[in-house]
Image (spheres, grey):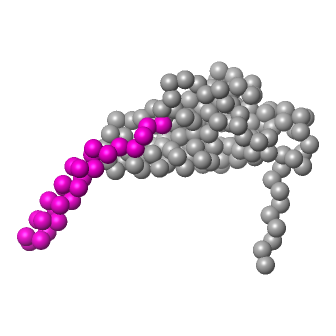
Amino acid sequence: MKILKKVFIGLLVVLIVVQFYHPEKNSSATVSPNNIATVFATSEEVKTILATSCNDCHSNNTIYPWYNNIQPVAWWLNHHINEAKHELNFDEFATYSPRKRYNKLKETEKLVNENEMPLSSYTLIHRNAVLSEQQKQVLVDWTKNIRKEMESKYPMDSLLRPKQKPTI
């Protein structure tokens, strides 16, 4: 019983100490000059949808919930945001190659259509981020229009992913 009490006190001390260590926040005071809206026509409706349902994870500016002040939650959120930004960052979209832009838009369309984005773990707490059918269609149409615009500017073989070579 004494060992269990010592373990509990030790864990409590560790939990208290880690509260003083927070990862750097994903926060920017200005809109990035590389934002997707700087290179592609983006309606106010699409900007609103992105801000509400996408940008907390897929931009350089996260609006943090109150529970971000509790460790280890802040570390978990920071890791999740970094992974999401690595996959797609709307604030760095202008820096992507045409092929990457095209493919990221195609992936976005697919993930939205399949209800995989925004993540259900995010929308569970952020109910306003749940996309209506109309909002999904607006996003899908937007991605399709941009891809059509890109197809008219670039040869298709430069936009499509190279085929994977079979492994032996």
Image quadrant where one finds the C terminus: bottom right
Residue projecting furthest to the top: 44
The total of numbered circles placed on residues is: 0
Question: Which residue is rendered at x = 90% and y = 49% of the image?
Answer: 157
**Which sits in the foreground, 140 or 10?**
10
Q: Is residue 163 left or right of residue 64?
A: right
Please provide percent x and percent y for residue 69.
Answer: 32, 39
Does 18 sit above or below residue 94? below
Question: Which residue is rendered at x = 92% and y = 43% of the image?
Answer: 155
Q: Is residue 141 left or right of residue 64?
A: right
Residue 41: which quarter of the image?
Answer: top right
- What residue span does the magenta drawing correspond to? 1-26
Please provide percent x and percent y for residue 116.
Answer: 60, 48
Does 129 sit above or below residue 19? above
Magenta residues, dominant SS class: helix
Question: Which residue is rendered at x = 36% and y = 48% of the image?
Answer: 73
Question: Which residue is rendered at x = 84% and y = 32% of the image?
Answer: 149
Residue projecting furthest to the left: 2
Please provide percent x and percent y for residue 72.
Answer: 34, 50
Does the rendering let one see residue 106? no
Q: Is residue 76 left or right of residue 102?
A: left
Residue 134: which quarter of the image?
Answer: top right
Please provide percent x and percent y for residue 136.
Answer: 65, 36
Image quadrant where one finds the N terminus: bottom left
Does 99 sit above or below residue 33? below
